[in-house]
Image: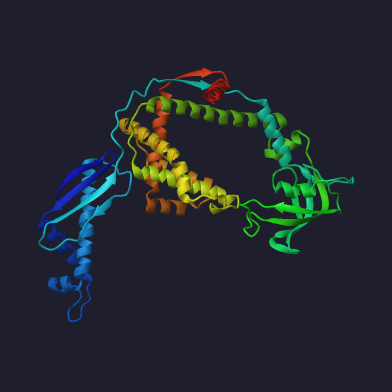
């Protein structure tokens, strides 16, 4: 077997393979023998069928399987010799072998481009200092109080207002008939939190328990109920009752209920540490982005098409899923998949550009990722998404997702190495944010 490698682009290679007739015949003989051992043909004992008979009866299957076996064997051998890791699936262009004839075929695949890397160690970068923000801690405490608040009936007779939780009956009417799917009795709603259309809440506000109101409401074009989307209908509401939140006091009892903390001080300390950890990750990410921007600013980085498409598909999929979680469809936004692809392409290309650069660094540093690390990341992904780990692992093996995970972990390792070898100068908290805002203002 002989082969020649052809560079189609800086990221795509084509391998042309020539297989001599002798190797073709050997492959056909081996495949024929396998079929002969299990062939059940009238007039012959099993396993004793002459090769010529087996070849005639199973010719199509034998040719196809011998071809596949040869191609698979050669690809593994060639890729091992070339020491290349494809970034995409291998595309084979092949006919089937013929007995006694030379066999030629080709296969193409994408690889990371060869890059001339700049010096990536010892770079200078500024990073904001991390300080505890008491206002942020106070806001978390208030959210805890709100989550543990009790709803109690409002004893005084008064009108419903923002902050109240109301129980209402309602129905959207057209020609005095209620729309199915948009009517309810004893529906609970917290006013002023954007849980319902503003026009609907306006009908409720100002009512006292036992009172009713009506008015026309125009529903948005992307309204969940497609029968009402973009239409105007009469909405009738009846206020059954009003409840208000009673917030618990900030004391040790609250701390215990909130998370088993011994005291309010211990709870605030845990909140502060969580806040500081989150801020550390954020300012480090900003510093790492600054380092990457410096390194890649003047670099020409060819992008593998499949890598860009992979990022693009993920971004579009994430966008659609976010819409669906809100009860909306892509069509309801007036956009198509092609519109989203155009919108997200620059972001996908930037992500691919970053990965290609970091993979080149990882390769130069001879970094590796162990199967245990890939397995750990898949477990984390499964836990985060609520998927079954076994199903995710099976999907990864079938689709090549484990290779993508490995590449991402390698890129993360390369980025961490660049950061750890940088000269990091700490600057006052908020100073870099202020600079960014000033620059934005000047540009505007």
The residue that appears at 17% across and 72% down in the rendered structure is 54
Q: How is the image coloured?
A: rainbow
The residue that appears at 74% across and 53% down in the rendered structure is 216
Coordinates of residue 252 in the picture (x, y in percent): 75, 34
Coordinates of residue 262 in the picture (x, y in percent): 70, 33
Specify whether 171 is left or right of 318. Answer: right
Badge count? 0
Specify whether 52 is left or right of 152. Answer: left
Quick one: 305 or 174, which is closer to the camera?
A: 174
Coordinates of residue 417 in the picture (x, y in percent): 40, 28
In the rendered image, which quarter is residue 118 located in?
Answer: top left
Q: Residue pushed farthest right?
A: 156
Q: Quadrant of the image for the C terminus? A: top right
The relative height of residue 235 versus residue 277 in the rendered view (above or below) is: below
The relative height of residue 266 versus residue 150 in the rendered view (above or below) is: above
Quick one: 407 or 366, which is closer to the camera?
A: 407
The residue that appears at 49% across and 51% down in the rendered structure is 336
- Does residue 249 appear in the picture of this structure? yes
Q: Residue pushed farthest bottom?
A: 43
The residue that appears at 23% across and 46% down in the rendered structure is 14
Specify whether 16 is left or right of 242. Answer: left
Specify whether 259 is left or right of 336. Answer: right
- Does residue 378 appear in the picture of this structure? no
In the rendered image, which quarter is residue 442 located in?
Answer: top right
Quick one: 237 or 150, which is closer to the camera?
A: 237
């Amino acid at each position: 077997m002989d082969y020649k490698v052809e560079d189609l682009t800086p990221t795509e290679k084509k391998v042309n393979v020539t297989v001599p007739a002798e190797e073709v015949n050997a492959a056909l003989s081996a495949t024929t023998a396998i079929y002969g051992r299990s062939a059940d043909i009238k007039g012959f004992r099993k396993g004793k069928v002459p090769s010529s008979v087996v070849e005639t009866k199973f010719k199509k299957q034998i040719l196809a399987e011998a071809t596949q076996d040869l191609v698979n064997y050669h690809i593994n051998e060639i890729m091992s010799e070339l020491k290349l890791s494809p970034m995409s699936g291998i595309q084979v262009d092949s006919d089937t072998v013929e007995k006694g004839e030379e066999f030629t075929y080709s296969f193409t695949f994408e690889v990371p481009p060869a890059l001339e890397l700049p010096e990536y160690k010892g770079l200078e970068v500024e990073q904001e200092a991390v300080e505890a923000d008491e206002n942020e801690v106070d806001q978390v405490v208030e959210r805890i109080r709100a989550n543990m608040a009790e709803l109690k009936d409002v004893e005084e007779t008064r009108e419903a207002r923002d902050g109240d939780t109301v129980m209402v009956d309602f129905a959207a009417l057209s020609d005095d008939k209620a729309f199915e799917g948009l009517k309810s009795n004893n529906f609970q709603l917290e006013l002023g939190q954007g849980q319902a259309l503003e026009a609907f809440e306006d009908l409720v506000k100002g009512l006292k328990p036992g009172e009713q109101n009506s008015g026309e409401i125009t529903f948005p074009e992307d309204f969940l109920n497609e029968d009402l989307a973009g239409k105007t209908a009469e909405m009738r509401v009846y206020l059954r009752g009003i409840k208000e939140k009673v917030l618990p006091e900030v004391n040790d009892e609250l701390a215990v209920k909130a998370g088993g903390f011994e005291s309010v001080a211990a709870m605030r300390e845990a909140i502060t540490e969580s806040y500081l950890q989150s801020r550390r990750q954020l300012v480090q990410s900003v510093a790492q982005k600054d380092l990457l921007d410096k390194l890649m600013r003047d670099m020409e980085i060819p992008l593998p098409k499949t890598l860009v498409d992979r990022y693009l598909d993920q971004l579009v999929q994430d966008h659609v899923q976010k819409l669906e979680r809100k009860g909306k469809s892509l069509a309801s936004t007036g956009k198509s998949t092609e519109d989203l692809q155009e919108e997200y392409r620059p972001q996908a290309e930037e992500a691919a550009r970053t990965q290609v650069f970091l993979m080149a660094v990882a390769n130069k540093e001879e970094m590796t990722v162990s199967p245990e690390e890939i397995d750990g990341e898949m477990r984390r992904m499964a836990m985060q998404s609520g998927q079954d780990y076994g199903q995710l692992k099976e999907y990864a093996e079938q689709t090549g997702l484990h290779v993508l995970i490995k590449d991402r972990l390698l890129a993360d390792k390369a980025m961490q190495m660049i950061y750890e070898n940088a000269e990091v100068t700490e600057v006052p908290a908020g100073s870099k944010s202020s600079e960014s805002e000033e620059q934005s203002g000047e540009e505007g």
